[in-house]
Every structure is written in C-alpha cells, then in structure tokens.
Image: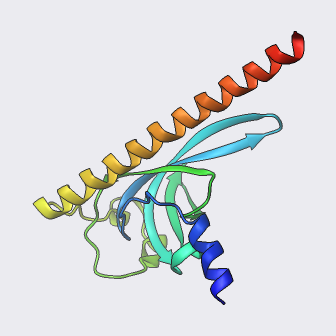
Amino acid sequence: MDLIKTIEEQQKKANVPDFRVGDTVKVHFEIIEGKTKRIQIYEGLVICIKNSGIRQTFTVRKTSYGVGVERVFPVNSPRVMRIEIVRPGKVRRSKIYFVRDKIGKDAKIKELITPKAKARVDAANALSKQAAKAEEALKAEIKEEIKEEKSAKKS
C-alpha cells in the first residue's frame, strides 16, 4: 500500500488552483494530432468534482451551438496545462447536475462577489500563470536541446 501512495505522490501536480463547483473556468488542454501538438482552451461551468488525490477529476459543461457539451478532465493529467478561473459561482450543492435541464438564462449560476472569493480567484490565477511560465521555460529548454542534438549530428 505504501508503494502505491508514494508513486501517486510523485505524479501529483504541485500547483493546482483552488477551483470549486459552480466556477466558470478555462481549461488549457494539450491535444496531440499526429506529430503536431496544440493547446485548446475549453471554457465552461464546473458541474462536479469527483474523487481525491491523484484520481481527482472535474466535469466542465459548456453550450456549443445550442447543444450542451460536457467533458471530464483529470486534475493531475500532464495534458492539462493550466486551469484559469474566469468567475466564481455561488452554489449550495456539491454536484450541480440540475443545470443540464436548464436552458438559456435559467442555466446561469449567480456570481459570488465577496472579497474572500476575489482573493481566492486572484491567488488561483496567479498560480496558474506561474505554472504556465514554468511550462514554457521547460519547453524552450527542450527545444534548445533538440537543436543542439541536430547540430551535433550534422557535424
């Protein structure tokens, strides 16, 4: 049992923002198509957060061309580059599946406007930006190493 826990702790992300159910978030997700990689931004409402630890997932719902679309993201996935909180929501439930039946303005969640909520959002977004900068620095370093390897092969 201890072995599994130690492996899980190694794979856990250190800088996960504190988002909650009811928040509107932007998830920067890496998509690999053949040899090319790109980052797709998926913006929507967090309707549930399941599990804990390394297995934690969250479901984001958005309306695309009049059709409700839901996507489940693992919090600790290496493909999830960053999670940005757009606006905090005011909900009284841990899972807001009732939003699926709502249409138009009914599907809107009230915005939570308090100094505490604003501080939480600012801290989460700062953490997200810091993670993005670290990720870009790492990618630049990898690109330089690849260039050096190519130049070494040529000479």
**Residue occupying image coordinates x 61% and y 73%:** 8
Q: Does the image show residue 132?
A: yes
Q: Does the image show residue 114?
A: no
Is residue 151 shown above or below 81? above
Q: Nearer the viewer, residue 57 or 103?
A: 57
For this orientation, the residue located farthest to the bottom is: 1
For this orientation, the residue located farthest to the left is: 115
> What x and y, as percent, mark residue 109?
30, 65
Q: Nearer the viewer, residue 97 or 141?
A: 141
**Residue occupying image coordinates x 34% and y 82%:** 93
> What x and y, as percent, mark residue 25?
41, 54
Is residue 78 shown above or below 142? below
For this orientation, the residue located farthest to the top is: 155
Specify the color scheme: rainbow
**Residue occupying image coordinates x 70% and y 27%:** 145
Question: Quick check: 101 left or right of 106?
Answer: right
**Residue occupying image coordinates x 33% and y 62%:** 108
Question: Quick check: 73 left or right of 146?
Answer: left
| The quadrant where residue 99 appears | bottom left
Quarter of the image containing the C terminus?
Answer: top right
> What x and y, as percent, mark residue 51?
53, 81
> What x and y, as percent, mark residue 150?
82, 19
Is residue 4 shown above or below 67? below
